[in-house]
């Protein structure tokens, strides 16, 4: 399964890949080299897997983007009302860090049905399907707002003012639906064009989802902040769009800013997409300047969809959501044929048949229509109750004689990239956690979980996430919405342990076989693209080197800005790499990365022993060079966290049977109230009862009592050993 | 748990009642010490006459309920009871003897501060019937006294004890505190030896405990003064045990040592869970698994009593599980220990092995190391 995903890795930087492949062939084992050459030959439309970036900064930027009017920071936000907070997470969750006005509108399905004029079937020649791709904070949502206004999709001033209130209300009633594609009508030159603006998630966790959204379009507006210039996600998105065969409309935004350098940035952008600098449109989404010209350009540059009404139906699911009343709502792009609103349909990948109950478009209210024709974008309700039956990337066709036989290409299961154990702090909450995960899974197809037992933490679940952001969101939602207190083990990547012909997939460090019982271990790697001002190049290289990185290439985008490609182990960047990068470049560098195959690495499992007993929750798989450092740091941290017991407690870090670090928590000698007379007894008894309750919350590892908090603190990601250079 | 202890005695059968005690609280002090969180106030001396009247009145109010109890000890604590006039103290004691069935040979203790007693006062106290004197010495190290914010000089303790002996006191206790900032095991050992030289019949040695609500507690919290090091206090405890043992004192409670026969009857009452009546502001009373306590602020206490009401500020009824927990943690403080049958053998076993507990006459008794870890023992044995 894993091999397939690596084959599917999208070509991004041709030169880099060629070099990498050559290096790989020279260096690596035959199967890996073969996989890499297959990857080289893989289809251009194939997409890279979704990967993670652990960035509080990204999250914060997102908040700023969404609520730029308020400019509140994440932490003040946290203290505000629950619903507003939940809204934020849901938004992030649903649309992954960027929010266009399309999904802000949140129309209700099937309510206030407004008959949509379908007497005239839209000619595919009048349809344009496009998306806006941009680095975070480059003004994507503002531009979407302007487009909605310009096409009168929404009444004059209602959207910004209304959307929060409306969301709160809808959230409380739990009947929200995100509109991932909004239909705009734009009359020009005597014709009315049907423009479908399709939203794309912006975060690297969701690259696969982005690629599916792109597959629903024929064109992409590549939006770049004229003051910031090209950033890593600009590149990533551009390459994804180009690989998807989309027509690119390069656009500079924020030209009204005093700091804007439109000429400079236009040159960069023109060079990237291969056009003349004069061909780069200049707009200000804030003032509306140039937006009409942009719409005209979209109509001109983006080709109309192909596809014939007579062909068997093939509709791509590019997103889905869950509505408590209607079940799963699939967002679809009809490639061929007609999707009628009432028919028996088949989901080709899952092989599931269902009855279509309602088809419609977002205009921008959810509006039922009798059918979706070729090239059209809309939604389909089939009454299925589980998002796992409606998979992003799947193809819908009809049943019976007219069915299609070949599904659209590019489908694959969302693959978790980061794994972590989730345990209830209170053992009794196990069933609550299980139910909560079941419920979350209803509208999160990417969440994986399976029961797991830890000696130290009891019963819990090993969960797979698309990335750290995804993990944080899931944990946060479990804690908030289900009132759970959770202990999360340190996240880890998926390791492959090779023993002869056998590949053992390890999701949990404690499952790693003992040293000497296998041939080698392979870990996932990524190709990272970093764009940095030239003055910080040294700092960036230093950081990447300290993370076992291998420089692939670099090139000057302009005299001041450099694009660097590094080949890095995923495990090295999943923790705080992005934060480190930001802090070492004063926030100027940007990062994107894509999976780049498994490679052998000298990885060892470091165990932590308390009083001679290994604590499975603290085991970690790290590179041999960092094993001692990891062991030392864990042992030192635990020494601060483990309370003194009635005996000396040895805290040891070991690789196999070799102890690499040791500390001792000396036995407690004194724990007694000096005075206990008539007036002290009641207070003293209550104190003891408190202590008794505290004891009940301790977890016992062998003979050692370890408080909950010690586990939580020791497993905190931001302090993890090996992650600080 | 097995064999929860039966309440001893019964309301309806005064003959079977076990001996009871009376505690009288005097909330006045010359100054407030930085470590002290007792219900005590400096600068309220002008209230003393009214307070004494309130004590007498409260005793009257309590008489009907406690008339049948056999009182084997009276304890005047504080605060500093000796801030009151001898005549007032005498009046209080006389009143108690009139109102309650106080045994002729009852142990009657008064707490004293070295600076509040002189020869004539001591003469008066002894004559009034206060046969046991408990002196707050705290330390014989000037540095330690300074760290504790005690105003007295070590010499005034020696003087006060000499004068007490001269007045005829045959039962004197000295209170000592160890583990203050700057104190070493060696300086503490000197203090213990200095105390022994005064030949008190009884010695209390307390590890300094930082109470958050006190000035010292606030200084520790803000980091101005380091918190006492528990390991150092454990060393000092062991030193105390050794030195006092050599000097012929018997270690009969966590913080108390006595020459044979001079164990404090009154305090043993608390640890054996005998009934006690508390009079005065904030005083606690206990009888038949019922505990209640008086209003703490002296003004409010007096107002209530003057209105003819019992000045109760709060109460609790002890459930059998509460009573069991109290029995265990109080009895483990003293050498009597708890009967083995009260505790599951499997729970006691590890501690017998590790030497924190020992068997003695069918009871589980803490060893010296066990006394230092009493909280752990109690939690494990009752858990």
Image (cartoon, grey):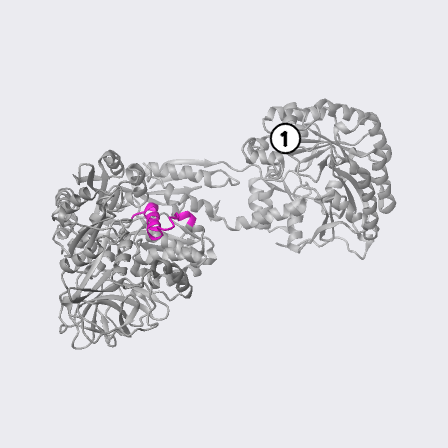
- Image coordinates of residue B180 in percent, x first then y, are 61, 30
Q: Of residues A566 and A108, which is closer to you in this image?
A: A108
Q: Residues within 10 Å of mark 1 (few under 14, many from 20)?
A: many
Q: Of residues B329 and A546, which is closer to you in this image?
A: A546
Q: Of residues B162 and A45, which is closer to you in this image?
A: A45
Picture quarter with the C terminus of chain A? top left
Task: Check residue A57 for magenta coloring.
Answer: yes
Q: Residue furthest top?
A: B155
Q: Residue at x 24, y 64 (%)?
A: A184
- Image coordinates of residue B40 in percent, x first then y, are 71, 38
| Quadrant in the rendering for residue B369 | top right
Helix, strand or loop under label 1: strand
Tag 1 residue = B178
Would residue A49 be found to the left or right of residue B240 on screen? Answer: left
Q: Of residues B256 and B43, which is closer to you in this image?
A: B43
Would residue B277 be found to the left or right of residue A14 on screen? Answer: right
- Image coordinates of residue A588 in percent, x first then y, are 27, 40
Task: Check residue A371 for magenta coloring.
Answer: no
- Image coordinates of residue A392 in percent, x first then y, are 25, 62
Give the extent of the magenta segment.
A53-76
Q: Residue at x 83, y 46 (%)?
A: B57
For mark 1, name the chain. B
Residue B199 is at least partly visible in this image: yes
| Quadrant in the rendering for residue B198 | top right
Looking at the image, residue B243 lies above or below residue A497: above
Looking at the image, residue A470 lies above or below residue A265: below
Looking at the image, residue A252 lies above or below residue B234: below
Residue A596 is at least partly visible in this image: no
Would residue A661 be found to the left or right of residue B140 on screen? Answer: left
């Amino acid at each position: 399964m894993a091999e397939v995903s690596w084959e599917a890795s999208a070509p991004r930087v041709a030169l880099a890949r060629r070099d990498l492949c050559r290096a790989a062939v020279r260096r690596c084992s035959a199967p890996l080299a073969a996989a890499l050459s297959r990857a080289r030959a893989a289809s251009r439309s194939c997409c890279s897997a979704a990967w993670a970036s652990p960035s509080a900064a990204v999250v914060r930027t997102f908040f700023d983007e969404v609520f730029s009017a308020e400019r509140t920071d994440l932490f003040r936000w946290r203290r505000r009302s629950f619903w507003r907070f939940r809204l934020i997470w849901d938004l992030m969750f649903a649309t992954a860090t960027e929010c266009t006005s399309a999904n802000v509108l949140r129309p209700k399905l099937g309510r206030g049905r407004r008959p949509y004029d379908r007497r005239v079937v839209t000619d595919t020649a009048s349809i344009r399907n496009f998306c806006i791709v941009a680095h975070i904070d480059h003004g994507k949502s503002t531009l979407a707002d302007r487009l909605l206004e310009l096409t009168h999709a929404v009444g004059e001033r209602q959207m910004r003012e209304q959307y929060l209130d409306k969301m709160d209300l809808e959230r409380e009633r739990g009947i929200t639906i995100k509109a991932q594609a909004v239909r705009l009508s734009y009359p020009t030159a005597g014709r009315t064009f049907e423009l479908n603006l399709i939203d794309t998630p912006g975060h690297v966790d969701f690259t696969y989802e982005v690629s599916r959204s792109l597959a629903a379009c024929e064109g992409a507006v590549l939006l770049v902040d004229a003051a910031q210039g090209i950033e890593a996600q600009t590149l990533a998105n551009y390459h994804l769009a180009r690989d998807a065969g989309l027509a690119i409309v390069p656009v500079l935004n924020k030209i009204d800013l005093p700091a804007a350098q439109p000429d400079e940035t236009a040159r960069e952008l023109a060079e990237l997409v291969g056009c003349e600098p004069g061909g780069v449109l200049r707009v200000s989404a804030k003032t509306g300047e140039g937006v009409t010209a942009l719409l005209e350009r979209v109509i001109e540059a983006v080709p109309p969809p192909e596809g014939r009404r007579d062909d068997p139906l093939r509709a791509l699911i590019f997103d889905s959501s869950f509505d408590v009343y209607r079940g799963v709502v699939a967002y679809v792009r009809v490639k061929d044929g007609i999707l009628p609103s009432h028919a028996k349909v088949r989901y080709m990948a899952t092989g599931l048949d269902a009855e279509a109950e309602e088809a419609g478009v977002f205009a921008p209210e959810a509006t039922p229509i009798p059918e979706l024709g070729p090239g059209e974008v809309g939604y389909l309700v089939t009454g299925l109750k589980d998002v796992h039956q409606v998979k992003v990337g799947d193809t819908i066709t009809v049943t019976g004689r007219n069915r299609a036989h070949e599904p659209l290409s590019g489908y694959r299961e969302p693959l978790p990239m980061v794994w972590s154990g989730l345990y209830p702090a209170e053992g009794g909450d196990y069933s609550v956690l299980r139910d909560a995960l079941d419920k979350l899974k209803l509208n999160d197809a990417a969440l994986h979980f399976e029961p797991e037992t830890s000696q130290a933490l009891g019963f819990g679940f090993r969960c797979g996430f698309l990335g750290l952001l995804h993990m944080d969101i899931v944990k946060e939602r479990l804690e908030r919405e289900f009132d759970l207190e959770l202990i999360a083990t340190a996240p880890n990547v998926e390791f492959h342990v090779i023993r002869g012909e056998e590949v053992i997939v390890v999701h949990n460090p404690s499952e790693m076989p003992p040293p000497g019982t296998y041939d080698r271990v392979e870990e996932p790697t990524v190709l990272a693209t970093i764009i940095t001002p030239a003055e910080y190049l040294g700092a960036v290289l230093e950081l990447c080197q300290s993370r076992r990185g291998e420089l692939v290439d670099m090139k000057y985008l302009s005299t001041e800005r450099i694009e660097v490609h590094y080949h890095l182990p995923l495990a090295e960047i999943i923790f705080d790499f992005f934060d480190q990068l930001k802090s070492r470049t004063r926030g100027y560098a940007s990062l994107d990365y894509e999976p780049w195959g498994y490679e052998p690495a000298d990885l060892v499992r470091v165990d932590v022993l308390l009083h001679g007993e290994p604590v499975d929750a603290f085991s970690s798989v790290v590179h041999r060079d960092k094993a001692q450092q990891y062991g030392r740091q864990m042992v030192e941290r635990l020494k601060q966290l483990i309370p003194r017991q009635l005996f000396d407690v040895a805290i040891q870090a070991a690789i196999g049977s070799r102890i690499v670090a040791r500390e001792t928590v000396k036995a407690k000698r004194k724990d007694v109230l000096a005075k206990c007379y008539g007036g002290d007894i009641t207070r003293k008894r209550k104190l003891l009862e408190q202590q008794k309750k505290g004891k009940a919350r301790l977890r016992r590892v062998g003979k050692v009592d370890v408080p909950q908090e010690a586990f939580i603190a020791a497993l905190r990601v931001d302090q993890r050993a090996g992650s600080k250079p | 748990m097995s064999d929860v202890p039966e309440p001893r005695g019964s309301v309806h059968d005064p003959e079977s009642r076990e001996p009871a005690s009376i505690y009288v609280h005097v909330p006045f002090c010359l100054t407030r010490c930085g470590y002290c969180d007792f219900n005590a106030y400096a600068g309220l001396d002008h209230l003393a006459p009214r307070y004494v009247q309130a004590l007498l009145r409260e005793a009257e109010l309590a008489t009907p309920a406690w008339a049948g109890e056999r009182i084997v000890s009276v304890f005047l604590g504080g605060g500093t009871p000796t801030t009151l006039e001898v005549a007032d103290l005498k009046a209080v004691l006389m009143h108690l003897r009139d109102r309650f069935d106080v045994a002729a040979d009852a142990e009657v203790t008064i707490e004293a501060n070295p600076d509040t007693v002189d020869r004539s006062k001591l003469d008066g106290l002894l004559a009034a019937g206060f046969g046991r004197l408990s002196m707050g010495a705290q330390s014989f190290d000037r540095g330690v006294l300074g760290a504790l914010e005690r105003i007295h000089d070590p010499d005034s303790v020696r003087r006060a004890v000499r004068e007490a002996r001269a007045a005829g006191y045959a039962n004197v206790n000295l209170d000592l505190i160890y583990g203050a900032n700057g104190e070493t095991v060696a300086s503490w050992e000197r203090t213990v030896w200095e105390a022994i030289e005064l030949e008190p019949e009884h010695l209390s040695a307390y590890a300094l405990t930082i109470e958050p609500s006190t000035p010292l507690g606030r200084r520790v919290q803000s980091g101005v003064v380091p918190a006492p090091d528990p390991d150092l206090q454990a060393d000092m405890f062991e030193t105390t045990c050794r030195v006092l043992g050599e000097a012929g004192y018997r270690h009969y409670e966590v913080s108390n040592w006595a020459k044979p026969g001079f164990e404090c009857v009154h305090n043993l009452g608390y640890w054996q869970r005998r009934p006690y009546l508390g009079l005065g502001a904030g005083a606690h009373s206990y009888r038949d698994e019922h505990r209640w306590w008086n209003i703490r602020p002296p003004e409010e206490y007096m107002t209530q009593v003057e209105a003819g009401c019992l000045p109760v500020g709060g109460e609790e009824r002890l459930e059998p599980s509460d009573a069991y927990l109290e029995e265990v943690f109080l009895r483990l403080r003293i050498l009597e220990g708890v009967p083995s049958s009260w505790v599951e053998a499997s729970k006691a076993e590890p501690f017998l092995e590790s030497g924190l507990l020992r068997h003695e006459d069918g009871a589980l008794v803490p060893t010296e190391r066990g006394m230092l870890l009493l909280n752990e023992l109690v939690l494990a044995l009752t858990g």
